[in-house]
Image: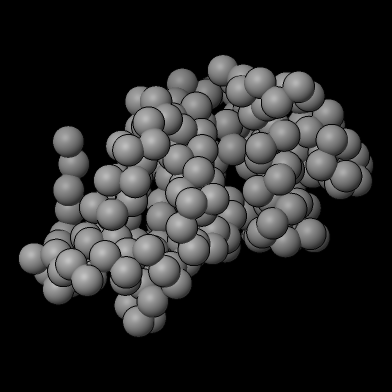
Amino acid sequence: MSTTTTGTTVSDIQTGWVVDFWLDPACPLTRHTARWITQIAGEVPLEVNWRVMSLSILNEHRDDDPEGDPHGYLWIPARVAVAVQTKHGHDALGAFYDALWTDPDGTERQWPGELDAALQRTGLPVELAKAGTSTDYDSELRASHHDGVDRIDAEIGTPVLAITAPDGGQRAFFGPVLDTVPTRSERLRLWEAMAILTKVPTLREIKA
């Protein structure tokens, strides 16, 4: 059995991990990270819990909105997503998120699709789309958002990943933010790197 310089064995990296994944459902770069972690979960024993954060909440006290969303459109998909999370759980949120970003034939979209169509394709109540233009789930959205972003030192964006190792140790990270979905060899190396970083308690921040 080989061992890394941090004392993490290869078998540790391959088994018994959990990732809590906070996403804003409208962010294109986050979609690359979500596809990466889904592919990893299909290749190694890894449980993914999908959770909602919101760029609208992140930026609501800033004078200059980096998302360029003065009319608040980003609230709508986040509110629908948290309604799904609240009423139907994390797995349903993951399925809804996938449907939002794919066409019915499975082709990946460049931008999210229609909310009601994604709900229907996932087998969820279409009336949940109404949550997008109401404040009924805003307390749940804020709670889910802060559960994620408060784990890192700065509120800097989406996604936030909390990675729990087989021994129960946990670290939270902003990112990784990916320009594209990695190839198979790249995605495995990236996962191994993230797993190793989880074991480094003195790590504060890393950014390319």
Residue 131 visible in rendering: yes
Is residue 196 positioned above or below 168 on the image? above
Q: Where is residue 204 in the image (x, y as percent from the top left)?
A: 16, 60
Task: Work out which residue is located at the far left of the displayed protein and give it.
Answer: 5
Residue closer to the observer: 145 or 13: 13
Query: Which corner quadrant holds the C terminus?
Result: top left
Q: How many labels does the image show?
A: 0
**Residue most toward the front?**
1
Residue 116 in percent (x, y) is at 84, 32
Q: Nearer the viewer, residue 63 or 10?
A: 10
The residue lying at 75 percent from left, 38 percent from top is: 132
Q: Is residue 187 left or right of residue 119?
A: left
Q: Which residue lies furthest to the top in this view?
A: 110
- Quick check: can you spot residue 130? no
User: From the viewer's perspective, is residue 148 above or below residue 113?
Assistant: below
Residue at 74% x, 53% y is: 92
Look at the picture and state if 207 lies above or below 200: above
Q: Name the quadrant of the N terminus.
A: bottom left
Task: Look at 69% across and 56% down and name the residue there.
Answer: 91
The residue sitting at 45% across, 40% down in the picture is 36
Q: Looking at the picture, does residue 132 appear above or below residue 4?
A: above
Q: Which colour scheme is used?
A: one colour
- Residue 25 position within the rendered picture, expressed as x and y whole percent measured from the top left: 59, 38
Residue 130, quarter of picture: top right
Where residue 76 appears, as percent x and y from the top left, is: 69, 35
